[in-house]
Image (spheres, helix red, strand yellow):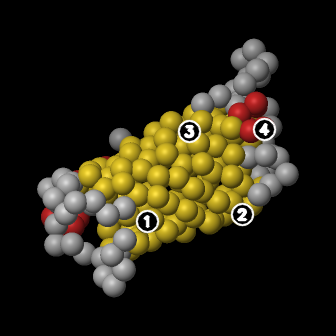
Amino acid sequence: MPRSLRLFTVALSLAVPALLSAQSAARPVSFGLSGGVSLPSGDLGDAADAGYVIAGHVYYKPTTIQALRFRGDVSFDRWAIKNTLAGADASTRNVGIVANALYDFAGNGTSPVKPYLLAGLGLYNNKTSSAASSDGGGSTDIGIQVGGGMEYQLSGFATFVEAKYVNTFSGSGVSWIPLSFGVRF
């Protein structure tokens, strides 16, 4: 294992418990990680198979607005291209940086389950590559995402499941549906 990877692993193992215990104090800023399946749709769905998504999140909860939160996302989606020549390895990937608003539905005060809606605007970089070629830096486009989820509060952290529809405003019809499971600490 490379030395830098070992150092990162040690630092992460020391930081996560501290972050989990800090969250129990109801701070306005929190962090999250998520991952799941990414289902291409539209023109992308015609060209690519289902893939995966991983994402990091930064949350901000204003103290003056009860039902509203803000979240910044950095996401990575990857899909394998369908019908490639035998032995060819082709894929397309998308990296997104998105600012979201989350609306939390009011529930009874004792329930640990909290449903929410989200809407966001961001920049998405899409790139297709194969063993033989690459499209360079790809294209960067503005896009939106809308969706919803359920958050389940546990002791010191929360888990969530989420479904979104993402669409970039490009001529190539890039849209997809990420279905994710994550943790917020």
Tag 2 and tag 4, C-beta contact below 8 Å: no
Give the residue pinned by disc 3.
38
Callout 4: few (<14), some (14-19), or many (20+) C-alpha neighbours within 10 Å? few
Tag 3 and tag 4, C-beta contact below 8 Å: no
Q: Nearer the viewer, residue 137 or 163?
A: 163
The answer to which of marks 2 and 1 sits earlier in the sequence is: 1
Q: What's the amino acid at mark 1?
A: Tyr
Give the residue pinned by disc 4.
43
Disc 3 versus disc 1: nearer the observer = 1
Residue at (77% x, 57% y) in the render: 169
Residue found at the far top of this picture: 86
Tell me the number on the disc at residue 35.
none
Q: Quadrant of residue 77?
A: top right
Residue at (56% x, 39% y) in the render: 38
Residue 35 image point, x, y percent: 44, 44
Q: Nearer the viewer, residue 85 or 9?
A: 85
Q: Secondary structure at mark 2?
A: strand
Residue 129 visible in image? no
Disc 2 versus disc 1: nearer the observer = 1
Q: What's the amino acid at mark 3?
A: Ser
The answer to which of marks 2 and 4 sits earlier in the sequence is: 4
Give the residue pinned by disc 1.
103
Q: Secondary structure at mark 1?
A: strand
